[in-house]
Image (spheres, rainbow, N blue to C red):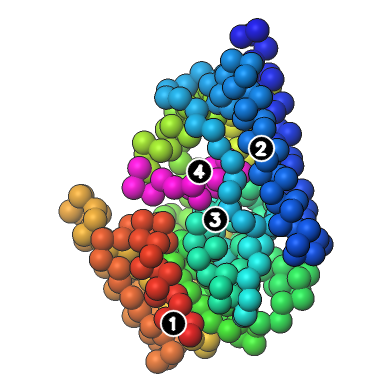
Amino acid sequence: MSSILPFYSYIMDWISKAWRTVDLSDLPGGLFQKVTQMRHAFSVGCAALLFLVGTSPLQSFSGPGPRRGWVDQSPHKSAFVESNGVKLHYLDWGGQGKTLVFLAGLGHNAHIFDDLAPRLTARFRVLAMTRRGFGLSDKPASGYDVDTRVADVLGFLNALQLRRVILVGHSIAGDELTAFAASYADRVESLIYLDAAYDRSQEPDAQAVREGKEPPGAPSIPKEALLSVDAYLSYFEKSFSREWSSAFEASLRDGIEIHPDGTVERRTPDSIYRAIRKGSLLASLDYSSVRPRTLSLYEDPSMYDDTQARKELVEEIDRSIALLRRSGPQVEIARLPGAGHYLFIDHLDDVVKKMIAFLQ
């Protein structure tokens, strides 16, 4: 029996994931809730069935630590749209009021907002888009410059007939926010940068790219971490213990392929990581043209143990804030004491309060 468990677990995991990604966007509210409950029950059933044959959903794979039974419990719809020639995956948490659209940082997808998004649906309709190259979105060989990424966002809004939105971005998504607001100010109600408004043109890698060198690719992962889903998740849980959450785990799960033998690999090739970094490092962003009301949240450099890294981050934040303030008095800056780069995870309550107060 043990020899077939990895393959059996792979099949159950694949079926469960396929069911979770069924497009439910056209269902009416009441039916959507019932189908969501059925989807949840199905996932739980898969976990129970695997347990009964002698394994939990991840114990069939080699790797450190026990596999935790896992179900995507964030109350969202999962759907796709065609935008700018590519298929983009997005999540829709529903809600009432103005539309708020999240964009993830490099290496992540819409699921990284699984914990934050539901906290906002009482006041806003909340969606999150996964950019090309990541998660379940298409992964063409090209189109990772900032202009094309902005065109993807525009196509996404047009496809969903969203005339004017609140754009919220984490990390490298700040480049899309800045460029989009400069080109399509009439489509933006407000901007919120989640440790995302940075002047990347002054980074050491930017000069190297301008000289024709390639930027760094995806962060390296030890081979042992690719032996199973459990090993992969355990590696990241140890590496990102401060940021670990159901949303972080969901984003990681959506970013990997599981092979029949239980081994895993990233969905996103290294070349795409390099291309998107290159696109951001070479972008000429005009912060002075950012006219919508803007909230920019920043992490706390004092959280870094390395003195030089802390000093460089302080300088980078100060330089970036100075650039952002050039756009006018509509910019509000907030530094969150004790917060890390994933401040919307490690300081979730603070970020929710800041966002709601700013948007009221």
| Residue that label 2 marks | 43
Indicate which disc residue 249 carries: 4
Q: Position of residue 276 (x, y in %)?
A: 57, 55
**N-terminal label among 3 and 2:** 2
Magenta segment includes 251: yes
Identity, as a three-letter code, of the amino acid under mark 3: Asp
Cβ–Cβ under 8 Å for marks 2 and 1: no
Total number of numbered discs in the rendering: 4
Question: Marks 2 and 4: CB-CB under 8 Å?
Answer: no
Across and down, in percent, residue 121 comes to: 57, 70
Density class for disc 4 (Cα within 10 Å; few <14, some 14-19, many ≥20) is many
Amino acid type, callout 2 = Ser
Q: Residues within 10 Å of mark 1 (few under 14, many from 20)?
A: some
The boundaries of the magenta stretch are: 241-255
Disc with the residue nearer the chain's start (1 vs 3): 3
What's the distance in space between the residues labelled 1 and 4, CA to CA?
29 Å
| Snapshot quadrant of residue 5 | top right
Q: Position of residue 286 (x, y in %)?
A: 50, 80
Identity of the amino acid at label 4?
Glu
Could you say which quadrant of the image residue 339 lies in? Answer: bottom left
Q: Tell me the distance, in whole angstroms, between the alpha carbons under discs 3 and 2.
A: 17 Å
- Distance from Cα at disc 2 to Cα at disc 1: 38 Å
The local secondary structure at tag 2 comes to helix
Mark 3 crowdedness (10 Å alpha carbons): few <14, some 14-19, many ≥20: many
Circle on res. 51: none
Q: CA distance from mark 4 to mark 3?
A: 10 Å
Q: Residue drawn at (71%, 81%), measured in percent from left and top? A: 163
- Whichever of callouts 2 and 1 sits on the residue coming sooner in the sequence is 2
Q: Residue at x 67, y 30 (%)?
A: 46
> Label 2, label 4: how many angstroms apart (C-alpha)?
16 Å
